[in-house]
Image (cartoon, grey):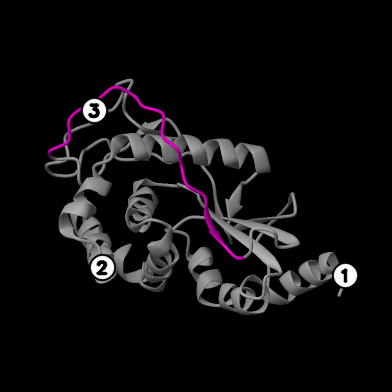
Amino acid sequence: MKQRMMTIALATALVAGAGWWVAGTPKAPTINGQAITLPGAANAQESAAADVTIQEMVLGAEDAPVEIIEYASYTCPHCATFHQGAFKNLKADYIDTGKVKFTYREVYFDRYGLWGSLVARCGGEDRFFGITEMIYDTQSEWSRAGSEAAIADELRKIGRIAGLENDQLEACLSNGEKARGLIEWYQANAEEHGINSTPSFVIDGTTYSNMSYGEFEEIIDEKLGS
Protein backbone atom coordinates (compact mmCIF):
# COMPACT_ATOMS: atom_id res chain seq x y z
CA MET A 1 0.00 0.00 0.00
CA LYS A 2 1.07 3.58 -0.62
CA GLN A 3 2.33 5.41 2.40
CA ARG A 4 -0.57 7.39 3.87
CA MET A 5 -0.47 10.65 5.75
CA MET A 6 -1.44 10.14 9.35
CA THR A 7 -0.90 11.61 12.77
CA ILE A 8 2.52 10.45 13.85
CA ALA A 9 3.39 10.02 17.52
CA LEU A 10 6.93 11.35 17.38
CA ALA A 11 9.15 10.63 20.35
CA THR A 12 9.51 13.54 22.77
CA ALA A 13 13.06 12.61 23.69
CA LEU A 14 15.58 14.79 21.87
CA VAL A 15 18.56 13.55 19.91
CA ALA A 16 21.57 13.49 22.20
CA GLY A 17 22.99 17.00 22.29
CA ALA A 18 20.21 18.52 20.16
CA GLY A 19 18.47 20.36 22.93
CA TRP A 20 17.33 23.49 21.14
CA TRP A 21 13.60 22.79 20.95
CA VAL A 22 11.39 21.71 23.78
CA ALA A 23 8.07 20.11 22.94
CA GLY A 24 5.25 22.57 23.41
CA THR A 25 7.21 25.83 23.08
CA PRO A 26 5.68 28.29 20.58
CA LYS A 27 8.84 28.41 18.46
CA ALA A 28 9.18 24.66 18.06
CA PRO A 29 8.54 23.45 14.49
CA THR A 30 5.96 20.67 14.46
CA ILE A 31 4.65 17.90 12.25
CA ASN A 32 1.04 16.94 12.95
CA GLY A 33 1.20 18.79 16.25
CA GLN A 34 4.33 17.02 17.45
CA ALA A 35 7.47 19.03 18.17
CA ILE A 36 10.51 17.85 16.25
CA THR A 37 14.25 18.18 16.65
CA LEU A 38 17.15 18.73 14.30
CA PRO A 39 20.39 16.74 14.50
CA GLY A 40 22.58 19.77 13.97
CA ALA A 41 20.94 21.90 16.65
CA ALA A 42 23.43 21.36 19.47
CA ASN A 43 24.96 24.83 19.18
CA ALA A 44 21.94 26.67 17.78
CA GLN A 45 20.27 29.53 19.59
CA GLU A 46 16.60 30.40 19.62
CA SER A 47 15.75 33.39 17.48
CA ALA A 48 12.66 35.29 16.51
CA ALA A 49 10.52 33.69 13.84
CA ALA A 50 11.48 34.91 10.37
CA ASP A 51 9.81 34.77 7.00
CA VAL A 52 11.52 32.11 4.92
CA THR A 53 11.26 31.82 1.16
CA ILE A 54 11.21 28.19 0.05
CA GLN A 55 12.75 27.61 -3.35
CA GLU A 56 10.83 25.44 -5.78
CA MET A 57 13.04 22.67 -7.14
CA VAL A 58 12.35 22.41 -10.86
CA LEU A 59 13.60 20.45 -13.85
CA GLY A 60 12.74 21.09 -17.49
CA ALA A 61 11.76 24.08 -19.57
CA GLU A 62 9.87 26.85 -17.79
CA ASP A 63 7.50 27.12 -20.77
CA ALA A 64 6.96 23.36 -21.23
CA PRO A 65 3.39 22.59 -22.35
CA VAL A 66 2.75 20.14 -19.47
CA GLU A 67 3.49 20.72 -15.79
CA ILE A 68 3.94 17.91 -13.26
CA ILE A 69 4.35 18.46 -9.53
CA GLU A 70 5.47 15.45 -7.52
CA TYR A 71 4.71 15.21 -3.79
CA ALA A 72 7.04 12.72 -2.13
CA SER A 73 8.63 11.79 1.18
CA TYR A 74 12.25 10.72 1.51
CA THR A 75 11.13 7.98 3.91
CA CYS A 76 8.45 6.59 1.55
CA PRO A 77 9.52 3.29 -0.12
CA HIS A 78 7.11 3.82 -3.03
CA CYS A 79 8.71 7.20 -3.69
CA ALA A 80 12.12 5.54 -3.82
CA THR A 81 10.76 2.98 -6.29
CA PHE A 82 9.37 5.76 -8.49
CA HIS A 83 12.66 7.65 -8.54
CA GLN A 84 14.67 4.52 -9.27
CA GLY A 85 12.43 3.55 -12.18
CA ALA A 86 9.61 5.55 -13.77
CA PHE A 87 11.17 8.93 -13.02
CA LYS A 88 14.25 8.13 -15.10
CA ASN A 89 12.04 7.37 -18.10
CA LEU A 90 9.92 10.45 -17.47
CA LYS A 91 13.02 12.62 -17.36
CA ALA A 92 14.53 11.17 -20.53
CA ASP A 93 11.33 11.16 -22.60
CA TYR A 94 9.54 14.30 -21.46
CA ILE A 95 11.52 16.54 -19.09
CA ASP A 96 14.83 16.65 -20.95
CA THR A 97 13.01 17.07 -24.28
CA GLY A 98 11.18 20.22 -23.17
CA LYS A 99 7.72 18.67 -23.01
CA VAL A 100 7.30 18.63 -19.21
CA LYS A 101 8.17 21.08 -16.46
CA PHE A 102 8.74 18.95 -13.35
CA THR A 103 8.59 20.30 -9.80
CA TYR A 104 9.52 18.24 -6.75
CA ARG A 105 7.85 19.07 -3.43
CA GLU A 106 8.65 17.36 -0.17
CA VAL A 107 6.11 15.76 2.18
CA TYR A 108 7.02 15.23 5.83
CA PHE A 109 5.71 12.19 7.69
CA ASP A 110 8.47 12.31 10.27
CA ARG A 111 11.63 14.12 11.33
CA TYR A 112 13.86 11.91 9.18
CA GLY A 113 12.18 13.07 5.98
CA LEU A 114 12.69 16.66 7.10
CA TRP A 115 16.38 15.99 7.84
CA GLY A 116 16.75 14.52 4.37
CA SER A 117 15.15 17.61 2.90
CA LEU A 118 17.53 19.92 4.75
CA VAL A 119 20.49 17.94 3.41
CA ALA A 120 19.13 17.81 -0.15
CA ARG A 121 18.50 21.57 -0.18
CA CYS A 122 21.84 22.37 1.45
CA GLY A 123 23.68 22.53 -1.87
CA GLY A 124 21.05 24.64 -3.60
CA GLU A 125 19.16 23.87 -6.78
CA ASP A 126 22.29 22.71 -8.63
CA ARG A 127 22.83 19.76 -6.29
CA PHE A 128 19.29 19.14 -5.10
CA PHE A 129 18.20 16.48 -7.58
CA GLY A 130 21.53 14.65 -7.42
CA ILE A 131 21.35 14.46 -3.62
CA THR A 132 17.69 13.46 -3.81
CA GLU A 133 18.63 10.57 -6.09
CA MET A 134 21.32 9.47 -3.63
CA ILE A 135 18.88 9.64 -0.71
CA TYR A 136 16.39 7.44 -2.53
CA ASP A 137 19.02 5.02 -3.84
CA THR A 138 20.26 4.40 -0.29
CA GLN A 139 16.94 4.77 1.53
CA SER A 140 16.91 1.20 2.84
CA GLU A 141 20.34 1.77 4.38
CA TRP A 142 20.20 5.21 6.01
CA SER A 143 16.57 4.93 7.18
CA ARG A 144 17.38 1.67 8.99
CA ALA A 145 20.69 2.78 10.48
CA GLY A 146 19.31 2.35 13.99
CA SER A 147 19.44 5.28 16.39
CA GLU A 148 18.47 8.80 15.41
CA ALA A 149 22.11 9.82 15.68
CA ALA A 150 23.10 7.03 13.28
CA ILE A 151 20.42 8.06 10.77
CA ALA A 152 21.60 11.67 10.94
CA ASP A 153 25.20 10.57 10.38
CA GLU A 154 24.20 8.54 7.31
CA LEU A 155 22.44 11.58 5.85
CA ARG A 156 25.52 13.69 6.58
CA LYS A 157 27.59 11.09 4.74
CA ILE A 158 25.37 11.48 1.67
CA GLY A 159 25.86 15.23 1.82
CA ARG A 160 29.64 14.88 2.04
CA ILE A 161 29.72 12.48 -0.91
CA ALA A 162 27.78 15.11 -2.85
CA GLY A 163 30.53 17.64 -2.09
CA LEU A 164 29.09 19.52 0.88
CA GLU A 165 31.47 20.63 3.63
CA ASN A 166 30.93 19.61 7.25
CA ASP A 167 30.32 23.18 8.43
CA GLN A 168 27.86 23.73 5.61
CA LEU A 169 25.95 20.58 6.51
CA GLU A 170 25.78 21.45 10.20
CA ALA A 171 24.50 24.91 9.39
CA CYS A 172 21.75 23.42 7.23
CA LEU A 173 20.83 20.78 9.81
CA SER A 174 20.52 23.40 12.55
CA ASN A 175 18.49 25.92 10.58
CA GLY A 176 15.28 26.09 12.59
CA GLU A 177 13.75 28.89 10.55
CA LYS A 178 14.25 26.86 7.37
CA ALA A 179 12.76 23.74 9.00
CA ARG A 180 9.74 25.70 10.21
CA GLY A 181 9.30 27.29 6.79
CA LEU A 182 9.51 23.92 5.01
CA ILE A 183 6.86 22.37 7.26
CA GLU A 184 4.46 25.28 6.79
CA TRP A 185 5.11 25.22 3.02
CA TYR A 186 4.44 21.49 2.84
CA GLN A 187 1.22 21.80 4.83
CA ALA A 188 -0.11 24.60 2.62
CA ASN A 189 0.80 22.71 -0.57
CA ALA A 190 -0.79 19.47 0.63
CA GLU A 191 -4.01 21.26 1.50
CA GLU A 192 -4.12 23.08 -1.83
CA HIS A 193 -3.79 19.91 -3.90
CA GLY A 194 -5.55 17.41 -1.61
CA ILE A 195 -2.44 15.30 -1.05
CA ASN A 196 -3.12 12.28 1.18
CA SER A 197 -0.56 9.75 -0.05
CA THR A 198 2.91 9.62 -1.54
CA PRO A 199 3.98 9.72 -4.18
CA SER A 200 1.22 11.89 -5.62
CA PHE A 201 1.33 13.91 -8.81
CA VAL A 202 -0.41 17.08 -9.92
CA ILE A 203 -0.53 17.14 -13.70
CA ASP A 204 -1.76 20.43 -15.11
CA GLY A 205 -3.76 21.06 -11.95
CA THR A 206 -5.29 17.58 -11.51
CA THR A 207 -4.10 15.39 -8.65
CA TYR A 208 -3.27 11.73 -9.29
CA SER A 209 -2.07 8.96 -7.00
CA ASN A 210 0.96 6.78 -7.75
CA MET A 211 0.91 5.22 -11.21
CA SER A 212 2.96 3.23 -13.69
CA TYR A 213 5.10 4.87 -16.33
CA GLY A 214 2.67 3.67 -18.98
CA GLU A 215 -0.12 5.60 -17.28
CA PHE A 216 2.08 8.69 -17.20
CA GLU A 217 2.66 8.34 -20.92
CA GLU A 218 -1.06 8.10 -21.66
CA ILE A 219 -1.91 11.21 -19.65
CA ILE A 220 1.00 13.30 -20.95
CA ASP A 221 0.60 12.25 -24.58
CA GLU A 222 -3.10 13.09 -24.45
CA LYS A 223 -2.29 16.56 -23.15
CA LEU A 224 0.38 16.99 -25.82
CA GLY A 225 -2.09 15.88 -28.48
CA SER A 226 0.21 13.14 -29.68
Q: Check disc 3 and report the residue beneath it.
A: 22
Rendering quarter of residue 15:
top left
Residue at 58% x, 59% y: name it: 2
Tag 2 secondary structure = loop
Which is more foreground, mark 3 or mark 1? 1
Q: Nearer the viewer, residue 37 or 8?
A: 37
Q: Which residues are magenta?
A: 43-60
Tag 3 secondary structure = loop
The answer to whether residue 195 is above or below residue 146 is above
Rendering quarter of residue 14:
top left
Percent x, y of residue 97: 66, 75
Whether pointer 3 and pointer 1 mark residues with C-beta atoms closer than 8 Å, the reply is no
Q: Nearer the viewer, residue 12 or 18?
A: 18
Magenta stretch secondary structure, dominant: loop
Q: Is residue 47 left or right of residue 68?
A: left
Amino acid of disc 3: Val
Real-space CA distance between mark 2 and mark 3, rounded to the nearest whole angstrom? 32 Å
Amino acid of disc 2: Gly
Residue at 65% x, 38% y: name it: 192
First in sequence: mark 1 or mark 2? 2
The answer to whether residue 54 is above or below residue 87 is above
Residue 222, can we see it? Answer: yes
Amino acid of disc 1: Gly
Percent x, y of residue 222: 85, 68
Crowd band around label 3 with a 10 angstrom C-alpha radius: few (<14), some (14–19), many (20+)? some
Q: Check disc 2 and report the residue beneath it.
A: 163
Quadrant of the drawing holding the N terminus? bottom right
Q: Check disc 1 and report the residue beneath it.
A: 225
Crowd band around label 1 with a 10 angstrom C-alpha radius: few (<14), some (14–19), many (20+)? few
First in sequence: mark 3 or mark 1? 3
Residue at 51% x, 41% y: name it: 186
